Image (cartoon, helix red, strand yellow):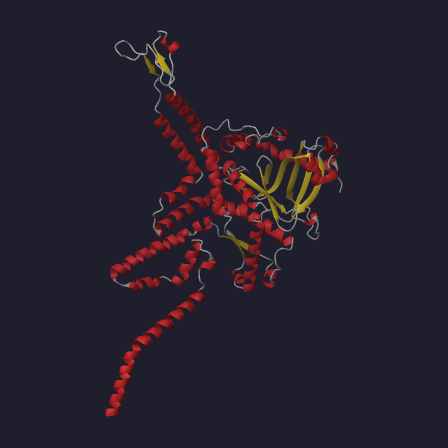
Amino acid sequence: MSFEDKEGLEVFQDFERNSKDRFNWETHWKEIAERFIPSHSNQFNTFSQNLQAKGQKRTEEIYDSTASIALGRFSSILDSLLTPKNQTWQKLQADSPELNKIRRVALWFEEATRLLFKFRYAPRANFASQNNQVWKSIGGYGTGGLFIDDAISGPGMRYKSIHLSQLFIVENHQGIVDKVFRYFSMTVKQAHDKWGDNLPDNLKSKLETAPAQEYFFIHRVQPNKNRDPNRLDAAGMAYESVYISVEGKKTLEKGGYNSWPYPISRYEIAPGETYGRSPAMEVLPAVKTLNEEKKTVLKQGHRTVDPVILAHDDGIIDTFSLKPGAINGGGVSADGRPLITTLPVGNIAVGKDLMDDERATINDAFFITLFQILMQSPQMTATEVLERVREKGMLLSPTIGRQESEYLGQVTERELDILQRQGVLPPLPPELVEAQGEYKIVYDSPLARAARAEEAAGLMRTVETAMGVAANMQDPSIMDHFDWDVIIPEVASIQGVPVKWVRGLEKVQQIRASRAEQAQAQEDIQAAPGQAALIKAANEVEKTA
């Protein structure tokens, strides 16, 4: 592989062209970080200014912690709604309903789903923590990104959340992010461990003298415009990958990917913009107001607890003592009128009310108030619970639902490509081979079930109405309109009941048949004495005749 300066220079110039429109964004993101994620506040600086002293105190702009706490809870809400670690929140199925009816096809997708979650949540994969960082970035900055690559040793994947200060994205004509630059720093030793002697000479010379010194590198991934489908190497892959050293503009590594390695997600996108906008941006004025109100209340609280003393100008203040039990002469006049008083302070209660208003606005933007409803109203009927879940699903689906299509779908495609290439997935059944492996992702997360809660809530309302009609008309046949053998399994699925907890229809029919046999046997036993009496009477009649 040749490492000509013009190739590395072309990548660097391409990066510069596509990074010029970030100044306004970075100013905005820095302001968000100072108030929501103070540990990130020094990250949004251009190029080499990123290398600042580590461990600095960065909470100077925070007087009230409501915003940072709300963002942390928001990321937890997204995690629990979309990607809960303790359940299988998505399933793979054939794209054709007819294929799904074939048992070995259904079993293949069931095994593929099991392997997908096994390697996704393997300890060395680190998906759970990195995915949570993406949710936090989406809540704070409106844009989040994840890098997915092969595990270093053994089969599986490795996940890394890419901080937005390192991530530069470009959309194609359809609004899909298909080009990414990652601008990041590494120490000389780390770079040598990855690229060896391909480093520029001036970096290699630092290996002995300054191995911990950091330098910048660029990773560019974009569609492979010169792709040759007949080739099995990087030239035949869908995306081309290039690493360069900013120092020397030298190409360090060239390669490719068959699937998109940088799943990117945006919270909301304004017309004409590439980067997303976040809930934090919407409530930034409220956060600033809350911080100013908190400063004012703290000042007034300090004056209330340790008040300013007002005294008559007769010299007694020079010897005035504030120690407990002290006796101060001259504090009152001969007739007992106080000569010393305190400076009146404002109404702190009003300040607290104003702060509570701003806190409510912040919590609403991050859906915290919405999720406190069920906790504050534990004594609810099943119908009321379904109604509340339905309402949450309606409010959350428009904004959070896009994470399934733009982010989680790309994550799954990348994971399946890696596992297939590593030979982890079982061989495709003939029917699926003929269909060219077409599949679809079915989401079974709490959010997906909340979106379906309208069906269950509508059923409960209808059943209550039908029961009322049946009671008023004294006609229970009204309930015959409901097919409970279909309804109960569907409601159980919507409510997230594990499949293994619910009996299949065949098992239910066997139980019913057994129950009917037992009932018939009981009837026979109960009818036996009467039948014996009839037989005896018939015999007596026959003898008499």
Question: Which image quarter: residue 144?
Answer: top right
* Residue closest to the far bottom: 545
The single residue placed furthest to the left in the displayed view is 544
Task: Name the residue at the top extreme.
Answer: 314
Front residue of this view, candidates 469 and 271: 469
| Residue 295 seen in render | yes
Depicted 93 relative to depicted 299: above or below: below
Q: Is residue 264 left or right of residue 343?
A: right
Q: In this image, 388 relative to 431: left or right? A: left
153 or 163, nearer to the observer: 153
Total numbered labels placed on residues in the image: 0
Q: Is residue 494 left or right of residue 148?
A: left
Residue at image coords 55%, 52%: 117
In the image, residue 518 lies at what x, y percent?
Answer: 37, 72
**Residue 175 in view (yes/no):** no
Query: Could you say where residue 180 lies in the image, as x and y percent from the top left?
Result: 61, 40
Q: Position of residue 419 (x, y in %)?
A: 62, 52
Seen from the viewer's position, the closer of residues 423 and 516 is 516
Quarter where residue 471 is shown: bottom left
Residue 340 position in % (x across, y down): 33, 13
Quarter of the image for the C terminus: give it: bottom left
434 over 532 or under it: above or below: above
- Where, quadrant-wise, is the N terminus in this rendering? top right
